[in-house]
Image (tube, grey):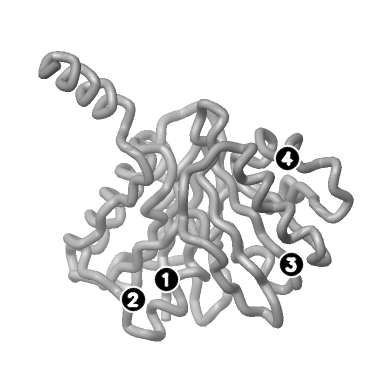
Amino acid sequence: MKILSVECSATPASVAIIDDRKVLYSSFTSIKMTHSETLIPMISDALKVSKMSVDDIDYYAVSVGPGSFTGVRIGISAIKGLAAKNDTPCVPVSTLFAMAMPFINFDCIVCAVMDARCNQVYNALFKIENNTVTRLCEDRALLCDELKSEIERFLSCEKIIIVGDGADIFYPFVEEYTNVVKADETVKFQNAVGVGFASITDIEKNNTVPPASLLPVYLRLPQAECELKKKQNSQES
Protein backbone atom coordinates (compact mmCIF):
# COMPACT_ATOMS: atom_id res chain seq x y z
CA MET A 1 0.00 0.00 0.00
CA LYS A 2 1.95 2.98 -1.32
CA ILE A 3 0.77 6.42 -0.14
CA LEU A 4 2.07 9.70 -1.52
CA SER A 5 1.33 12.53 0.90
CA VAL A 6 1.67 16.30 0.67
CA GLU A 7 1.71 19.06 3.30
CA CYS A 8 1.89 22.78 2.47
CA SER A 9 -0.64 24.41 4.80
CA ALA A 10 1.91 26.94 6.11
CA THR A 11 5.39 28.21 5.18
CA PRO A 12 7.04 24.73 5.06
CA ALA A 13 6.29 22.30 2.26
CA SER A 14 6.89 18.56 2.42
CA VAL A 15 6.31 15.38 0.44
CA ALA A 16 6.48 11.77 1.60
CA ILE A 17 5.97 8.28 0.22
CA ILE A 18 4.92 5.60 2.71
CA ASP A 19 4.62 1.87 2.05
CA ASP A 20 3.23 -0.55 4.63
CA ARG A 21 3.81 1.95 7.47
CA LYS A 22 7.41 2.51 6.44
CA VAL A 23 8.72 5.83 5.19
CA LEU A 24 10.31 5.26 1.80
CA TYR A 25 10.93 8.92 1.02
CA SER A 26 10.58 12.25 2.81
CA SER A 27 11.53 15.80 1.86
CA PHE A 28 10.96 19.10 3.68
CA THR A 29 11.67 22.71 2.81
CA SER A 30 10.99 26.01 4.52
CA ILE A 31 12.56 28.52 2.17
CA LYS A 32 11.13 31.81 0.97
CA MET A 33 9.57 30.45 -2.20
CA THR A 34 5.92 29.94 -2.97
CA HIS A 35 4.46 26.44 -2.86
CA SER A 36 3.50 26.81 -6.50
CA GLU A 37 7.26 26.94 -7.24
CA THR A 38 8.44 24.20 -4.90
CA LEU A 39 5.74 21.55 -4.56
CA ILE A 40 5.60 19.98 -8.03
CA PRO A 41 9.41 19.66 -8.29
CA MET A 42 9.41 18.08 -4.81
CA ILE A 43 6.78 15.54 -5.87
CA SER A 44 8.67 14.82 -9.09
CA ASP A 45 11.88 14.22 -7.11
CA ALA A 46 10.04 11.95 -4.65
CA LEU A 47 8.80 9.71 -7.47
CA LYS A 48 12.11 9.77 -9.33
CA VAL A 49 14.28 8.92 -6.32
CA SER A 50 11.81 6.20 -5.28
CA LYS A 51 11.83 4.84 -8.86
CA MET A 52 8.06 5.16 -9.08
CA SER A 53 5.44 6.81 -11.25
CA VAL A 54 1.88 7.82 -10.50
CA ASP A 55 0.87 4.33 -11.67
CA ASP A 56 2.61 2.87 -8.62
CA ILE A 57 0.75 5.04 -6.08
CA ASP A 58 -2.25 3.36 -4.44
CA TYR A 59 -3.49 6.37 -2.44
CA TYR A 60 -2.87 10.08 -2.12
CA ALA A 61 -3.14 12.01 1.14
CA VAL A 62 -3.14 15.77 1.55
CA SER A 63 -3.70 18.21 4.40
CA VAL A 64 -6.90 20.11 3.63
CA GLY A 65 -6.78 22.66 6.43
CA PRO A 66 -6.85 24.61 8.52
CA GLY A 67 -3.96 26.69 7.29
CA SER A 68 -2.91 29.17 4.66
CA PHE A 69 -5.76 29.56 2.17
CA THR A 70 -3.34 29.65 -0.76
CA GLY A 71 -1.11 26.85 0.53
CA VAL A 72 -4.01 24.47 1.18
CA ARG A 73 -5.46 25.10 -2.29
CA ILE A 74 -2.08 24.49 -3.96
CA GLY A 75 -1.66 21.17 -2.13
CA ILE A 76 -5.14 19.99 -3.03
CA SER A 77 -4.77 21.07 -6.67
CA ALA A 78 -1.47 19.19 -6.99
CA ILE A 79 -2.95 15.98 -5.59
CA LYS A 80 -6.05 16.29 -7.77
CA GLY A 81 -3.84 16.56 -10.83
CA LEU A 82 -1.73 13.54 -9.89
CA ALA A 83 -4.67 11.36 -8.90
CA ALA A 84 -6.84 12.24 -11.91
CA LYS A 85 -4.94 10.02 -14.37
CA ASN A 86 -6.00 6.76 -12.68
CA ASP A 87 -8.79 8.15 -10.51
CA THR A 88 -6.64 7.10 -7.55
CA PRO A 89 -8.47 7.33 -4.20
CA CYS A 90 -7.52 10.23 -1.95
CA VAL A 91 -7.65 10.97 1.76
CA PRO A 92 -8.31 14.51 3.02
CA VAL A 93 -6.43 14.93 6.32
CA SER A 94 -6.85 17.54 9.04
CA THR A 95 -3.63 19.52 9.28
CA LEU A 96 -3.91 19.56 13.07
CA PHE A 97 -4.56 15.82 13.38
CA ALA A 98 -1.51 15.04 11.23
CA MET A 99 0.61 17.13 13.60
CA ALA A 100 -0.08 14.68 16.43
CA MET A 101 1.31 11.69 14.51
CA PRO A 102 5.03 12.16 15.35
CA PHE A 103 4.17 11.68 19.04
CA ILE A 104 2.30 8.40 18.64
CA ASN A 105 4.82 6.55 20.83
CA PHE A 106 4.46 8.95 23.78
CA ASP A 107 1.68 9.06 26.36
CA CYS A 108 0.87 12.77 26.35
CA ILE A 109 -1.50 15.55 25.34
CA VAL A 110 -0.64 17.13 22.00
CA CYS A 111 -1.73 20.73 21.59
CA ALA A 112 -1.51 21.45 17.86
CA VAL A 113 -1.41 25.15 17.05
CA MET A 114 -1.13 27.14 13.84
CA ASP A 115 -0.76 30.88 13.55
CA ALA A 116 -4.14 32.38 12.64
CA ARG A 117 -2.94 35.96 13.29
CA CYS A 118 -4.57 38.65 15.43
CA ASN A 119 -3.59 36.76 18.63
CA GLN A 120 -5.53 33.73 17.42
CA VAL A 121 -4.49 30.17 16.64
CA TYR A 122 -6.02 27.27 14.81
CA ASN A 123 -6.04 24.51 17.38
CA ALA A 124 -7.04 20.99 18.30
CA LEU A 125 -6.12 18.86 21.33
CA PHE A 126 -5.29 15.16 21.18
CA LYS A 127 -4.66 12.57 23.87
CA ILE A 128 -2.12 9.89 22.99
CA GLU A 129 -2.12 6.74 25.06
CA ASN A 130 -0.94 3.22 24.21
CA ASN A 131 -0.07 4.31 20.65
CA THR A 132 -3.62 5.53 20.06
CA VAL A 133 -4.61 9.11 19.22
CA THR A 134 -7.91 10.35 20.64
CA ARG A 135 -9.28 13.68 19.49
CA LEU A 136 -10.38 15.84 22.45
CA CYS A 137 -12.02 18.64 20.44
CA GLU A 138 -12.81 19.65 16.90
CA ASP A 139 -10.50 21.85 14.86
CA ARG A 140 -11.25 25.48 15.77
CA ALA A 141 -9.90 29.04 15.78
CA LEU A 142 -9.62 30.72 19.17
CA LEU A 143 -7.71 33.34 21.12
CA CYS A 144 -4.47 32.34 22.83
CA ASP A 145 -5.93 33.29 26.21
CA GLU A 146 -8.87 30.98 25.61
CA LEU A 147 -6.58 28.11 24.71
CA LYS A 148 -4.48 28.74 27.82
CA SER A 149 -7.61 28.29 29.96
CA GLU A 150 -8.28 24.94 28.29
CA ILE A 151 -4.70 23.79 28.76
CA GLU A 152 -5.02 24.42 32.48
CA ARG A 153 -7.63 21.65 32.62
CA PHE A 154 -5.01 19.12 31.57
CA LEU A 155 -2.16 20.13 33.86
CA SER A 156 -2.54 16.89 35.83
CA CYS A 157 -1.38 14.99 32.72
CA GLU A 158 2.20 13.80 32.60
CA LYS A 159 3.18 15.97 29.62
CA ILE A 160 1.57 18.48 27.26
CA ILE A 161 3.42 19.10 24.01
CA ILE A 162 2.88 22.27 21.97
CA VAL A 163 3.45 21.60 18.28
CA GLY A 164 2.97 23.48 15.02
CA ASP A 165 4.01 26.69 13.31
CA GLY A 166 2.07 28.54 16.02
CA ALA A 167 4.08 26.96 18.86
CA ASP A 168 6.43 29.93 19.26
CA ILE A 169 3.45 32.27 19.42
CA PHE A 170 1.41 30.29 21.93
CA TYR A 171 4.09 28.76 24.17
CA PRO A 172 4.80 32.02 26.12
CA PHE A 173 1.21 31.85 27.38
CA VAL A 174 1.86 28.49 29.10
CA GLU A 175 5.63 28.27 29.65
CA GLU A 176 5.12 28.82 33.41
CA TYR A 177 3.73 25.27 33.67
CA THR A 178 6.51 22.74 34.19
CA ASN A 179 4.82 19.86 32.34
CA VAL A 180 4.06 21.95 29.23
CA VAL A 181 6.85 21.79 26.65
CA LYS A 182 7.38 23.03 23.14
CA ALA A 183 8.14 20.34 20.58
CA ASP A 184 11.71 19.95 19.41
CA GLU A 185 12.53 21.68 16.12
CA THR A 186 12.83 18.31 14.36
CA VAL A 187 9.14 17.53 14.91
CA LYS A 188 7.62 20.96 15.55
CA PHE A 189 6.31 21.75 12.08
CA GLN A 190 3.63 20.21 9.90
CA ASN A 191 5.05 17.39 7.79
CA ALA A 192 3.86 15.12 4.98
CA VAL A 193 5.01 12.06 6.93
CA GLY A 194 2.39 12.85 9.58
CA VAL A 195 -0.22 13.36 6.86
CA GLY A 196 0.60 9.97 5.36
CA PHE A 197 0.36 8.11 8.66
CA ALA A 198 -2.82 10.00 9.59
CA SER A 199 -4.43 8.71 6.38
CA ILE A 200 -3.82 5.03 7.10
CA THR A 201 -6.81 4.52 9.42
CA ASP A 202 -9.16 6.09 6.86
CA ILE A 203 -7.70 3.93 4.11
CA GLU A 204 -8.17 0.79 6.19
CA LYS A 205 -11.80 1.80 6.80
CA ASN A 206 -12.24 2.63 3.11
CA ASN A 207 -12.92 6.26 4.01
CA THR A 208 -11.44 7.69 0.83
CA VAL A 209 -12.74 10.11 -1.78
CA PRO A 210 -12.27 10.49 -5.53
CA PRO A 211 -9.87 13.26 -6.57
CA ALA A 212 -12.67 15.59 -7.66
CA SER A 213 -14.18 15.49 -4.15
CA LEU A 214 -11.11 16.92 -2.39
CA LEU A 215 -12.05 20.26 -0.84
CA PRO A 216 -10.29 22.68 1.51
CA VAL A 217 -11.51 23.05 5.10
CA TYR A 218 -11.56 26.67 6.22
CA LEU A 219 -12.29 27.59 9.83
CA ARG A 220 -12.89 31.17 8.85
CA LEU A 221 -13.34 33.09 5.62
CA PRO A 222 -10.30 34.21 3.62
CA GLN A 223 -9.38 37.86 4.31
CA ALA A 224 -10.51 38.96 0.85
CA GLU A 225 -13.96 37.46 1.45
CA CYS A 226 -14.16 39.09 4.89
CA GLU A 227 -13.39 42.50 3.39
CA LEU A 228 -15.95 41.97 0.63
CA LYS A 229 -18.59 40.97 3.18
CA LYS A 230 -17.88 44.09 5.26
CA LYS A 231 -18.16 46.26 2.16
CA GLN A 232 -21.47 44.65 1.16
CA ASN A 233 -22.89 45.05 4.67
CA SER A 234 -21.91 48.71 4.83
CA GLN A 235 -23.51 49.34 1.43
CA GLU A 236 -26.74 47.63 2.52
CA SER A 237 -26.93 49.68 5.71
Q: Earlier in the sequence, mark 3 or mark 2?
A: 2
Q: Earlier in the sequence, mark 1 or mark 2?
A: 1
Q: Earlier in the sequence, mark 3 or mark 1?
A: 1
Distance from label 1 to label 2 (Cα)? 6 Å
Q: Are marks 3 and 2 in contact (CB under 8 Å)?
A: no
Q: Earlier in the sequence, mark 4 or mark 1?
A: 1
Q: Give the residue displayed 24% in from the left and 56% down from the top.
A: 80
The residue wearing badge 2 is: 58
**Quarter containing the N terminus:** bottom left
Residue 88 located left or right of residue 152: left
**Location of residue 92 (image quadrant):** bottom left
The residue wearing badge 3 is: 108
Can residue 222 be seen? Answer: yes
Q: Nearer the viewer, mark 4 or mark 1?
A: 4
Q: Earlier in the sequence, mark 3 or mark 4?
A: 3
The residue wearing badge 1 is: 3
Residue 43 located left or right of residue 74: right
Q: Give the vertical position of 114 relative to 197 (above or below).
A: above
Query: Which residue appears farthest toward the front when viewing the image?
Result: 237
| Front in this rendered view, residue 218 or 29 | 218
Residue 70 located left or right of residue 176: left
Q: How many marks?
A: 4
Q: Earlier in the sequence, mark 4 or mark 2?
A: 2
Q: Are marks 1 and 2 in contact (CB under 8 Å)?
A: yes
Query: In the image, what residue type sits under mark 2?
Result: Asp
Under circle 2, the secondary element is loop
| Front in this rendered view, residue 150 or 86 | 150
Distance from label 3 to label 2 (Cα)? 32 Å
Residue 61, position in %: x, y? Answer: 38, 64
